[in-house]
Image (tube, rainbow, N blue to C red):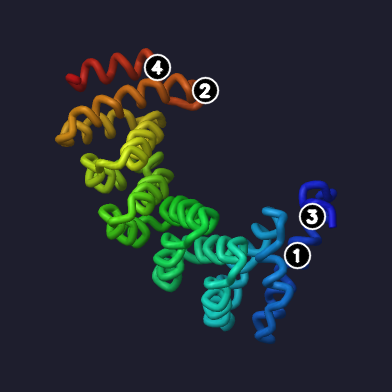
Amino acid sequence: MKPFYDLPQRERDELVATIQHDIFNELKTGQHKKTIAYFSDADTYIRKSAYLGVGRIYFAHKTLQTKVIQLLDELLPYDDFKVRQTVINAAGEIGKSDFKVVQHFFDTGLLDEHHSPRNAVIGSIKKMGEVNPKPVLAWAKKYLHHEDKEIRREICHGIELRGRKHPLDILPLLQELQFDKTARVRNTLVHVLGQIAYKKGCLQIVVEHLKTWDNKQLVADALEEIIDVHHRYRNFSALTQEEARKYIKLNYNI
């Protein structure tokens, strides 16, 4: 089969419909041969079509919801990391509206030995947190001081997207990481602070909150990152770099 995006639009649409139809039928029969093939496909977009299809089926067919969760539970320990990654992404689609039922997939995925399922956790936190923030951020908070530095870093990265429009939702969580001694966590924290500060109205909120932080060196580094972000993303930022620099100079004494 040609790669997904080498196919004409009509054939892509037909393939997506076929994937969802096959998964739907196998959920009813309890046989998952085709589903596993889609979940493990080398083509990222085939796997994406599969996990999006699972999400659509879950919400469109309430009588199959238990079977969907059973399917994902069955495949979560699968040897192929691509299957585990697709399971996490499917759980992320469900968690955008129904987080509690899929929370355990992210507890497990955070500890996966392969980076791809762990990255799927980050991506899922982003998409779930953007539209279903309360339970997702409450769950994320539990991992901010986990003994594994990579888990702390992944949680920090995962909550970023919610912060781009609603920085106050995540700033208290980020503040808990201000004295983290691991460079990768610290660098991610500084990066995220930059990412949530350049949209309209966000710089003011971030700067005001940073005044309450105790780690002044980290705050100084974050403010430098924020100024730099306003240049790197100058086509998307609400203020110019110079305007951001002047605002910070007037409102925060480094």
Element on which disc 1 rests: helix
Pointer 2 with pointer 1, Cβ within 8 A: no
Q: Amino acid at mark 2?
A: Asn
Q: CA distance from mark 4 to mark 3?
A: 42 Å
Front-lying residue, 231 or 117 = 117
**Residue named by callout 2:** 235
Q: Nearer the viewer, residue 237 or 113?
A: 113
Q: Earlier in the sequence, mark 3 or mark 2?
A: 3
Residue denoted by label 1: 17
For mark 3, what is the residue?
12
* Residue 109 vertical placement versus 165 (above, below): below
The answer to whether residue 214 is above or below residue 173 is: above
Element type where label 2 sits in the image: loop
Counting from the top left corner in percent of width and height, residue 63 is at 57, 83
The alpha-carbon separation of the residues under discs 4 and 1 comes to: 46 Å
What residue appears at the point 20 percent right and 22 percent down from the top-left corner?
Answer: 252
Give the residue type that dot 1 points to.
Ala
